[in-house]
Image (spheres, grey):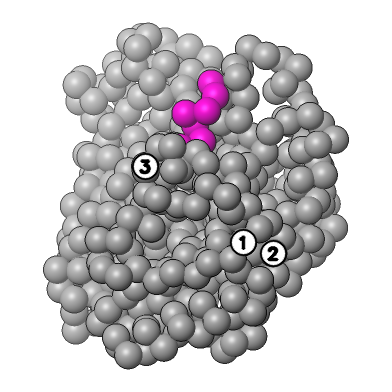
Amino acid sequence: MTLPAPLLAELRGIVGADDVHDTTGDLVAYSRDATPLFSHAPDAVVFPADTAEVAAVLVWASRHGVPVVPRGGGSNLCAATVPLRGGIVLVLTRLDRILEVSADELLARVQPGVTSATLADAAAARSLLWAPDPGSRTVATVGGTIATCAGGLRGLKYGVTRNYVLGLEAVLATGEVIRTGGRLWKDVAGYDLTRLLTGSEGTLAVLTEATVALLPAPESSNTGVAYFRTLADAGAAVAEVIRAGVLPATLEFLDRACIDAVEDFAHLGLRADAGALLLFGDDGPPDMVARNLDRIGAACADAGAIEVTTAREVAQAEALLAARRCALPALSRRGGVTILEDATVPRPRIAEMVDRIDAVAARHDVRIATFGHAGDGNLHPTCVLGSADDTDAVRRAEAAFSDIFAAALELGGTITGEHGVGAAKLPFLADRLGGDQLALLRRIKAAFDPAGILNPGKLGS
């Protein structure tokens, strides 16, 4: 749709003329997020300053039937913030204040535009920990992290974002402002709307404030790396680590292609002859960390590791973590288009899933590198293509990922562990949930958003 001049004038009257953008450059910039192959231009980009402006914009949109796609940093990898049906992209990055950090209550109140790294730094300054740790933490906003229920490198020990959301301020499509939950760890009054809105990807309401739980910061941390001949061997080692009675803070893996890409990109001295590596780490009292890393290393050795080392200093530990974080940008340098996906299987079936991914890649003649969160079974198969214009390569990659999602479901897993559904995973959602549950999602969507304006074409739409 194209917004008529009178409607644009009304919109500018709500948020101010400087905060409604509709030039071609602005529309192109907000036509996509970090997901390749998905793009659709909005009709306007709107930057509200506060909850009242968000509410007024949603009243306006409901009245005129204009789609609204809430957006933070746009770093999501499932096309959750691509405006498939035009309308307006509602960018919440101006709502970027940390309202409170309470060491006594172990919580913070933040606006949705605060980045995850900024919140983590503010918590650390008070000797506290913001546990969610998405790979794009420097640009990922807290609002977006909650909207997609993001995971990250600390998911095995600390869980994902939903474990830390105590309460939300949210604006419904009709303009009502609701507050769910609050400052309490224990509160079972009514339906758990906080948990429902977490992971709803902007389809039910627009989040304008969050109360999140913090933890005491661990006293120390350290990291190590174990090299293996194959990724399947590394996957088998994960089971040995868990059987050793250790729950690591970090347990990540890279396959051979990822190791090569990361080493070429960051020059960290990773072994070039290894087929895979496990990056492991823990945090807590120094003696416990040292003991746990020794136990993890021994478990990896028992599983056939060809080398196990532990970081000798903080800088080296941080460099190892940086190696894992830079896997995507390192792979992106290898081609014109990088399609990063996310599928999760039960932890004991990681090795089997790795074999299935390799077989799928060979069957469809595509290059797939795999890295991910070994501790919770979350794999990130990544396909590097020469160009998005190579329609045959794109078709083969899409067919490969379809087979990978089918394999994950067959092994008792899911189509997404942390990236979300968005537009990218929507074709596979019915396979994961079934028709009855999908119909229930649509009824819930209708109750929250009767006009169907919020992020249409996603989840229950």
- At 24% from the left and 45% from the top, the residue drawn is 95
- Judge left or right: residue 322 versus residue 33: left
Where is residue 36? Give x, y as percent: 55, 28
Answer yes or no: do the residues labelled 3 and 2 have beta carbons within 8 Å?
no
- Tell me if residue 338 is in the magenta stretch: no
Depicted 176 relative to depicted 53: above or below: below
Depicted 388 relative to depicted 128: above or below: above
Q: Which residue is mark 1?
A: 228
- At 52% from the left and 41% from the top, the residue drawn is 260
Kindly tell me whether residue 18 is visible in this rendering. yes
- Tell me if residue 332 is in the magenta stretch: yes
**Nearest the camera: 83 or 349?**
349
Binning the other alpha carbons within 10 Å of mark 1 as few (below 14), some (14 to 19) or many (20 upward) gives many
Q: Of the residues under marks 3 and 2, which one precedes in the sequence? A: 2
**Mark 1: which amino acid?**
Phe
- At 42% from the left and 16% from the top, the residue drawn is 28
**Nearest the camera: 16 or 339?**
339
- Judge left or right: residue 198 versus residue 385: left
**Nearest the camera: 83 or 50?**
83
- Judge left or right: residue 232 versus residue 219: right
- Judge left or right: residue 320 versus residue 33: left
Q: Which residues are magenta?
A: 330-336
**Nearest the camera: 170 or 60?**
170
Where is residue 346? Give x, y as percent: 71, 68
**Mark 3: which amino acid?**
Ala
Answer yes or no: do the residues labelled 2 and 1 have beta carbons within 8 Å?
yes
Q: CA distance from mark 3 to mark 1?
A: 20 Å
What element does badge 2 sit on?
Answer: helix
Q: CA distance from mark 3 to mark 2?
A: 25 Å
Q: Of the residues under marks 3 and 1, which one precedes in the sequence? A: 1
Query: Which mark is drawn over residue 266?
Result: 3
